[in-house]
Amino acid sequence: MSPTAHPLTVPMQADSVLPPRLAFGHLPLFPGDEDYPPNAIYFPLPPDEGGLGRVTFEGLDAVSGSRGEHLPYPRSVPLTAPTKIRDWVFEVSDSPWLAERHNYENHHYQTPLMDTHQHYLFSFHDQFVEAIAQGVWFDKPDPDEPLVPPPAHPLASFSQADPAEAHRSPSGIPWELRRCRKDQATLIRDSRLCSQRLYQFNLVLDGESREAASVWLRTSRGHTYSRMTRNWVGELACSDGLAAPDDFLGEWERYVHEVADRRRSMGKPLG
């Protein structure tokens, strides 16, 4: 099989002439950069809209830029007539680059990519940007703070100001549950581009509420699934479709029980 570019439906149209800017890396250049701006593609919107659009990445593994006006891979559906809406974002199937990155990551870090990552291609007037990533997200950056990710980004933690449901584990530790406030149809639509944080589980310890695990919704290669993850640990459990919090309650309570045992052994309170 040879690599093929499949058009991806996205919520923004890039200007058909002006070039993009690829922002990559984590070297802070200014005092306000301490939080490290996200890797992103900034692109001019069409003249009738004005301003900039932005692509940020979920699980970015590799990125490259090159010049050219002709797609580097054949389209899955050939163009037959001019169209007002230009295809400019593609997923590349049977990608040698994805296979190469998978082999590297799996060999050195035991991190397989083939089932979790995509090869994305962004086509501008005479430039291309390609990326190996788990997902992509489109937004309009704040003109006054163009390097700051939006607070409503689907990968951002829920705000402490968001409504929370208070619970107490049988192990004695209090915890909170926060839910995404998007409707189901919007969640599933958006999950085709990037994982959507469905639920956030916070432990309430020493008077502070902090995220301890989250459940994410993703639709990839026609499959919609929900998965629970913890920072620095990764995936704990997975369920088909749009899951309910109770689908992960057993896994969550096992973790909370471990936390309670550790705190008891250290002589710390359970709340």
Image: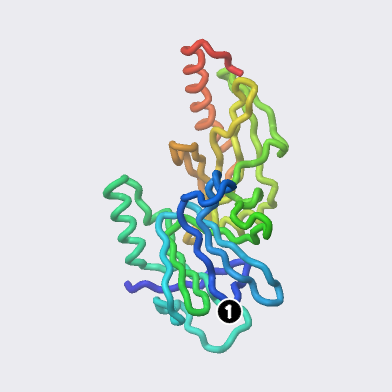
Amino acid carrying label 1: it is: Ser
Residue at image location 53% in from the left, 63% down from the top: 41
Q: Is residue 185 visible?
A: no
Structure colour scheme: rainbow
> Is 133 or 218 nearer to us in this picture?
133
Residue 210 image position (x, y, % from top left): 59, 31
Label 1 Cα crowd, 10 Å radius (few <14 / some 14-19 / many 20+): some
Q: Which residue is mark 1?
A: 16
> Is 52 or 188 nearer to us in this picture?
52
Residue at image location 53% in from the left, 53% down from the top: 38
Q: Residue furthest bottom?
A: 81
Quarter of the figure with residue 207: top right
User: Does residue 73 sit above or below 209 in this rendering?
Assistant: below
Q: Quadrant of the C terminus?
A: top right
Quarter of the figure with residue 114: bottom left
Residue 267 image position (x, y, % from top left): 51, 10
User: Does residue 169 sit above or below 43 in this rendering?
Assistant: above
Q: Residue furthest top?
A: 267
Q: Quadrant of the N terminus?
A: bottom left
Q: Residue furthest left?
A: 107
Residue 91 image position (x, y, % from top left): 46, 67
Question: Could you tell whether 194 is left or right of 184 in the image?
Answer: left
Question: For numbered disc 1, what is the local secondary structure?
Answer: loop
Residue at image location 48% in from the left, 79% down from the top: 126
> Is 30 or 128 nearer to us in this picture?
30
User: Does residue 59 sit above or below 202 in this rendering?
Assistant: below
Q: Is residue 240 visible?
A: yes
Residue at image location 61% in from the left, 52% down from the top: 148
Residue 147 image position (x, y, % from top left): 59, 55
Q: How many marks?
A: 1
